[in-house]
Amino acid sequence: MINILEVNETNKMIGEQNLDVRTITLGISLLDCACDDLSRLCDNIYDKITRVAKDLVATGKDIELEFGIPIVNKRIAVTPISLVGAGAAKSPEEYVKIAKTLDEAAHTVGVNFLGGYSALVSKGMTEADKNLIKSIPEALSTTNLVCSSVNVGSTRCGIDMDAVRLMGQIIKETSEKSDIGCAKLVVFCNAPDDNPFMAGAFHGVTEGDAVINVGVSGPGVVRRAVADTRGQGFEELCETIKKTAFKVTRVGQLVAQEASKRLDIPFGIVDLSLAPTPAVGDSVADILCEMGLEKAGAPGTTAALALLNDQVKKGGVMASSYVGGLSGAFIPVSEDQGMIDAAEAGALTIEKLEAMTCVCSVGLDMIAIPGDTSAATISGIIADEMAIGMVNQKTTAVRLCPAKGKKVGDTVEYGGLLGHAPVMAVNTFSCEDFISRSGRIPAPIHSFKN
């Protein structure tokens, strides 16, 4: 039974410490929409999304009002569109038409974002995959709510370096077409099928026809709890984080079950990720500082983040039988005021962020880089991050935002949850000859587990 002390504690988390459910994401399979006629395909996609998701936003709002739990976003994830469109879309331009249909459907049902304009190319690219990838700059610059992701590597398959090279060019082109397009584009290694967070969400082909996934958040809650452990040992610190993660996850579990019941759609997973926002006090970097670091990026940061990530997962898995997605701690620069402050102070560099991605969820996230950064350099950064994911058997990702006309030290404003970011320096020594090699980097020896 829940007692009055726990009720008051949860109310305090929501009212004073920025606890929220970051997203209810409805995954929808579009495999049954596939056909060989583009116009009919677009009609099928629009009809299915608007039918299955028609009550999503209203249901989320009802749960918010009834339980007093803020639900920041209501989102949709669909089957990777390179697969759905393969029979009908024979050019990048035709894939853009599908993207516009997705955007129209998302606007109709009133969601914040729709993910799944995606391709899975960890071992090689089909012609359909290439067409979708080449369409991304135009698709993201002509739609508002569509998000895109490309999985270019996995522990089992290695890294498709042809796709890595192409994605460097695509990110560069996207940045030139749209100020915010790159914020809606993620490059993955080991992408999960059930991630509810944007921009990397898609509905995996192993999933059912529809599923409800929930992403919780609570950096502010964890930071406040960690502040109470000052002067104590690591055992007390770990126990505090673990117990707090349990409480946060229980809130997400409640919302997920209610949404599933009311929409009559199966419950999938709760993603435990600590997802920050630009709001003061809602920062993963601030948690690290409460542990005893002057700034995120100081010596000891990677160890502190590893501790945080592990204890969040240990606490969360006791609160829900179905934990999935990414689950851990996000370290996006533009979306975390503490990370922004650390970068502006010179405490945090891309190289340090890369080291931190070895132990956290996702990877190099929402990092603004100079607009004149070459496509080859972007590909090199992607390759480095994909290697971390491949070798460590974990999900890693890159969401880089070349800032057109900006140089190191300038600031880029994205607005809303995307926040703002200082333009960070990148290593300017060339990797052109390495990136120009064709083929793939083979899977590591420990991938052979049969």
Image (cartoon, rainbow, N blue to C red):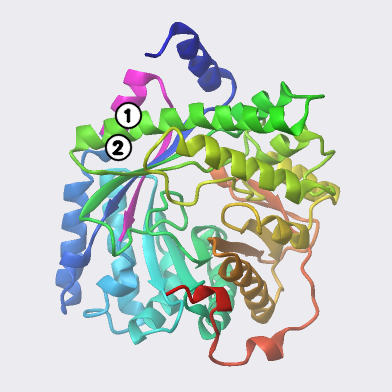
Q: Residue 266 location, x and y as percent?
A: 23, 43
Which quarter of the figure has residue 130? bottom left
- Residue drawn at 58 percent across, 45 percent down: 415
Question: Disc 1, disc 2: CB below 8 Å?
Answer: yes
What residue does disc 1 label?
61
Image side of residue 430 versus residue 184, left or right: right
Residue 450, compared with residue 392, is above or below; it is below
Image side of residue 127 versus residue 371, left or right: left
How many tags in the picture? 2
Residue 207, compared with residue 379, is above or below; it is above
| 71 is within the stretch colored magenta | yes
Q: Seen from this angle, which residue lies furthest front? A: 450
Q: Nearer the viewer, residue 176 or 386?
A: 386
- Residue drawn at 62 percent across, 72 percent down: 387
Residue 97, compared with residue 219, is above or below; it is below
What residue does disc 2 label?
57
Q: Residue 287 location, x and y as percent?
A: 70, 35
Element at label 1: helix
Q: Nearer the viewer, residue 29 or 407?
A: 29
State how far apart marks 1 and 2 are (Cα).
6 Å
In the rendered image, is residue 286 in sight? yes
Q: Nearer the viewer, residue 345 or 327?
A: 327
The mark found on residue 77 in the picture is: none
Report the amino acid beneath label 1.
Answer: Lys
Q: Nearer the viewer, residue 109 or 433?
A: 433
Q: Give the magenta range.
A: 59-78
Rate crowding at label 2 as few (under 14), some (14 to 19) or many (20 or more) other CA atoms within 10 Å.
some
